[in-house]
Amino acid sequence: MNFSFAVLQSDPTGARRGRLTTPHGAIETPVFMPVGTAATVKALTQDALEELGAGLILANTYHLYLRPGHQLIRRLGGLHAFMAWRNAILTDSGGYQVFSLSELRKITEEGVRFRSHLDGSEHLLTPEKAAEIQLALGSDIAMVLDECIETPAPREAAQAALRRTTEWARRARRYFLEFTHRDGAPAQWQFGIVQGATFADLRRESARQLLELDFPGYAVGGLAVGEPHDLTCEMAAEVTALLPRERPRYLMGVGRPEQLADYVARGIDMMDCVLPTRAARHACLYTSEGRVLIKNKRYMEDQRPIDPACPCSVCRRYTRAYLRHLFAAGEITAAILATHHNVRFYLDIMRQIREAITFGHLANFASELRARYAAGPA
């Protein structure tokens, strides 16, 4: 199956530098995954992503199931062939997207019945169905279906979601292993997702229950949805303290640039977030000096690059004045150039984090990173 994960080095904070090997290449961890919801990272071509050094991207089961359909993608050779992507892909289960449709879905023990946001058609997403879809897509890493709840949440709601998440994980694991036995070993790893809202004891209990199912990797879900950053870090640390050292740990849906090192210091190996691409489309650029809101009038005649310290092709060629003009004129190129830079910035932060772990000074790097963004946007 060509899968493996190894921790190569640790930092006094508890951070780990490692290597995740997949059939589509080896990824140095900690790693940030650009989000390619509908089999594309918005405003970037696959060539551009390769140029930026993205070895692992995320795609969305819910959206690909509804359009163009997982069976069509399977017939066309799987997600890698369909989107002409040579490197690794992680697919989420679609659970977060379904649960965000609060007025269009109903949760039962069987699964989640929901109406498509595209045409109103009714669908039932079960743990087995989510696994089936992702096997058809052929992603390298597939996530089980879990129950996402809003935070802050009553303890009773968090307990119920934890129980259902464990049961769904058990069903998803059973389906996955039965498929493997029946049709031969698929080139895919399946990860469990720890829930428990912001209750430390529930987080620990969820982790213990999932460990019994023996997943090759584990995610921490249901965070970064409005709770304070410190609480996210606390819950992540509670979980990683119980997870096996030799298996990868994924914190879902995070975070801001100045927060990434904090999560790594809690033992996290993998992260994803729409922020760098979404912010770029809204004219927010991340730089080594903090955020730049490029529509600001002060940049009208600014001949400097977006970030003088950035070696990306956008910073080497274009000025802030030109980027501001493109956004003011409503040109598509504005989003393309801004996204290219922001994704490079995130990937470069992860490179610097890996280097900081190597030299044992991640805590200092994290403090410097937070200081750069303390002043707020320009």
Image: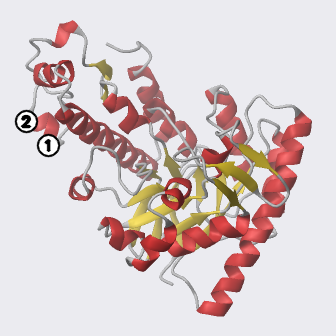
Q: Can you say which quadrant of the picture contains the C terminus?
A: top left
Q: Which residue is mark 1?
A: 313
Which residue is rendered at x = 73% and y = 49% of the image?
239
Answer whether labels 2 and 1 touch (C-beta < 8 Å). yes
Q: Which amino acid is tagged 2?
A: Arg
Which residue is rendered at x = 25% and y = 34% of the image?
335
Residue 233 point in image, percent of width and height: 65, 36
Residue 126 point in image, percent of width and height: 72, 63
Callout 1: 10 Å neighbours few (<14), some, many (20+)?
some
Q: Which of the 4 quarters of the picture holds residue 369? A: top left
Q: Secondary structure at mark 1?
A: helix
User: How is the rendered protein coloured?
Assistant: secondary structure
Residue 317: assigned label = 2
Instruction: Work out whether 265 lies above or below 6.
Output: above
Q: Left or right: where does residue 128 sit relative to residue 61?
A: right
Q: Left or right: where does residue 99 sit relative to residue 186?
A: right
